[in-house]
Amino acid sequence: MMNEAASRNSLLTAGAVASPPIVAGIGQCSLDFLFTVDQYPKEDVKCECRDFRVEGGGPVATALVALARWGVATRFCGVVCSDEFGREILDGLAREGVDPRGVAVRPSGVSQLAFICAVPRSGSRTIFWRRPEAAPLEPQEIPPHFLRDASVLHLDGLFSDASLHAARQAREMGIPVVLDAGSVRPGMMPLVTLTDHLICAENFARQFDPQASVGDALQRLKALGPSVVSVTLGNRGSLSLWEDIPWYLPALKVSVLDTTGAGDVFHGGYIWGLLQGLSPAECLRWATVAAGLACRALGGRSGIPSVEEVKAGLDRLGPFQPWSPSQAQLP
């Protein structure tokens, strides 16, 4: 049985990173336009929105922002266009301390945008997003020394060729690969085989094997190579598997304003734990608290908690529970 007290004590005594390691990330970056409504509207009506915010987004980019705020050196590689949106995306990363010099800037087109409607009353959010009008990142566009001195490579699999190239390099260099798998897209499954820590959305697990339960999918995904696989379940928590033992961890109970970016912060929190040398259980606890606290504000980055806030929230998190893949229902 997992030693919960030891896990909690190790997390509580983990301090700021003494000599900042480097986390390199390749993936999406966007400009998010966020607002709240009292309830999601029907079609063909006018609906007054309330809170409004514009900030950068994207799974890997936001995870790196969280890490940068927690004292980790980060560098990012992605694609923007040379428009006002692309400039704001790059400026936003730089302001947060994320090195954006690996981003390829296309001379024309429109950068990736997202319009996000959050309903605080229900805790739901709906994202309307637009792909960048730009060619995808190619392997040769990754800076030659992008992985030099990196402690972790974080990917979301959007640029499949570039991501596979970087993952193979990381494997040769002994750099752990963390994959944020939101959906099964082209090139994603070969990438899973090069991944050390797979943290995927429930949607990904169900797409991976529509006939299997999430518990069965968890085991099948781990058989592809990752040492740790975790399926995030939103406000129901997460199912995780390492050392052939499946565990369920409940979500942190918070007053939710907006869940945008919670999964991104979860990944950032998990990577932060890896950098501290924490166990998978401790990494997942840290990630769960960080993601929960991030839901208190509008936007994926505005609510990122401090290290101190995460530490303080650990005592509010429920314990791990053994989970049997044969159980018919998810929590």
Image: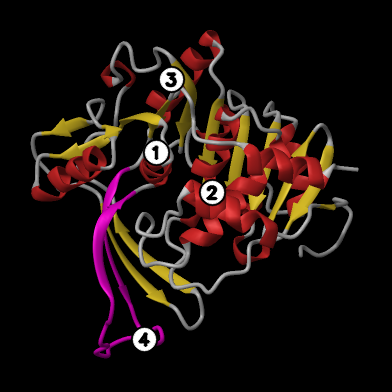
In the image, taking residue 6 as reference, residue 85 lies left or right, namely left
Q: Mark 1 sits on what residue?
A: 64
- The residue shown at (43%, 25%) is 20
Question: Mark 4: few, some, or many residues within 10 Å (few <14, many ≥20)?
Answer: few
- The residue shown at (30%, 44%) is 29
Of residue 314 and residue 135, the one placed in the foreground of this image is 314
Q: Which mark is residue 223?
A: none
Q: Which residues are magenta?
A: 29-57
Is residue 264 part of the magenta span, yes or no? no
Query: Looking at the picture, does residue 59 appear above or below residue 170?
Result: below
In the image, taking residue 197 as reference, residue 85 lies left or right, namely left
Is residue 38 part of the magenta span, yes or no? yes
Give yes or no for contact between labels 4 and 3 (Cβ–Cβ under 8 Å): no
Quadrant including the C terminus: bottom right
Q: Earlier in the sequence, mark 1 or mark 4?
A: 4
Q: Which mark is residue 266?
A: 2
Give yes or no for contact between labels 2 and 4 (Cβ–Cβ under 8 Å): no
Q: CA distance from mark 4 to mark 3?
A: 43 Å
